[in-house]
Amino acid sequence: MHEKIFRKETSDAKERGKIEIDEVSIVFGSGPTENIAVQETSINISPGEFVCILGPSGCGKSTLLNSVAGYVKPSSGRVLVDNEVITEPGPDRGMVFQQYSLFPWKTVHQNIAFGPKLAGYTPSQCDSIASTFLAMIGLSKIAKSFPGELSGGMQQRVGIARALANYPRVLLMDEPFGALDAQTRLMMQESLLNIWSEFGITVLFVTHDVDEAIFLADRILIMSSSPGSVIADLNVALERPRSPEMATSTEFVALKKECLSHIRAQSLKAFEEVGH
C-alpha cells in the first residue's frame, strides 16, 4: 500500500510545486520603528527545482521563506504555489528549521506518522508511510527511539522525513544543517540530494554557506542587504549527481568567487550604513 501511495505522490510531485513570488514587500512595524525586511521581490521557481537563497545576515532570507510557508503575510504583492495564493501555513509546504522541531515524547516512527494521521490516512497507511520514509533516510533500525536519544544529524534526517511524509508540493528549508559539524553536514547534504532526486520535489533552501549552496542548488539567488531583494540569479551548471570532489573544480571555484563577491559587497554596504 505505502509503495503505491509513494509512487503516485512522487509522480504527481513532478507536475507540481511551482513557486511565484510576485512583487513581494514585507514590512514590520511602522513609523520610526518601521523595518522593510523584503522590498519588491519577484522570483519564479519551476516544479522540481532546487533553489538556494544566499545573502548577508539580516537581509530577509528567512522572512521571504516564511512568506512562502504562510507564516508571514506580505505587506504588498503575492506568493503563489501552483497558481494558488498563499494566505496561511499548510501541509502542502513542508518546513524544516535549523532547530530540530520533533516531538520529544513521540518515537521517531510516531513523529513521521503524525502528519499523515492529521491528513486522515488510516492507522495502517500512517504506519506504512512512516516506514517508507524511515527506510528512505536509512533509519529503520531506530524507529522506536525517541529524538533525545539521537544525534543532531539523525534528528534532522527525521525532520526531513516528517516534512516529506505529508507529500508536500514544496520543501522549505531554513539553514537546516547550520548546527551540524562539518562532516555530518556534508553527509546530510548528500543525503538530501538523494532524497530530492528520488522525490522530485521543489526545494527552497536558505543558507549562509556558499559551498553548501553551490553543492546543492540548480540556481542560487543572492539577496541584498536590508531591505532585502534579489540582486543576482545564478545558474549552477555542475553535473548531477554531485560529489564533494567537485568543490575543487574550476567551475565550482569560479561560481564561489562570484557569490562571495556579491555577498561581500552587500555586507560592506550594510556595515557602512550601520556605521553612519
Image: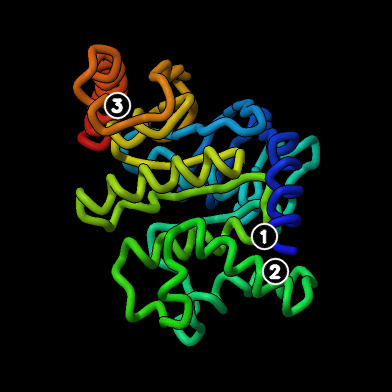
Q: Are marks 3 and 1 in contact (CB under 8 Å)?
A: no
Residue 167 lies in quadrant? bottom right
Give the residue at mark 3: 263
Foreground of the two, 172 or 276: 172
Foreground of the two, 55 or 215: 215
For the residue marked with disc 2, what is the amino acid? Answer: Pro
For the residue marked with disc 3, what is the amino acid? Answer: Ile
Foreground of the two, 162 or 198: 198
**Distance of label 2 from label 3 (alpha carbons):** 40 Å
Can see residue 89? Answer: no
Give the residue at mark 2: 116
Q: Secondary structure at mark 3?
A: helix
Residues packed near mark 2 inside 10 Å, few (<14), some (14 to 19) or many (20 plus): many
For the residue marked with disc 1, what is the amino acid? Answer: Asn
Q: Could you tell me which residue is drawn at 60 percent across and 36 percent down?
A: 25
Residue 48 lies in quadrant? top right
Give the residue at mark 1: 166
Figure quadrant of the C terminus: top left
Q: Are marks 2 and 3 in contact (CB under 8 Å)?
A: no
Residue 149 position, x and y percent, is: 33, 80
Which comes before the other along the chain, label 2 or label 1? 2
Can see residue 240? Answer: yes
Judged left or right of residue 66, residue 193 is left
Judged left or right of residue 61, residue 19 is right
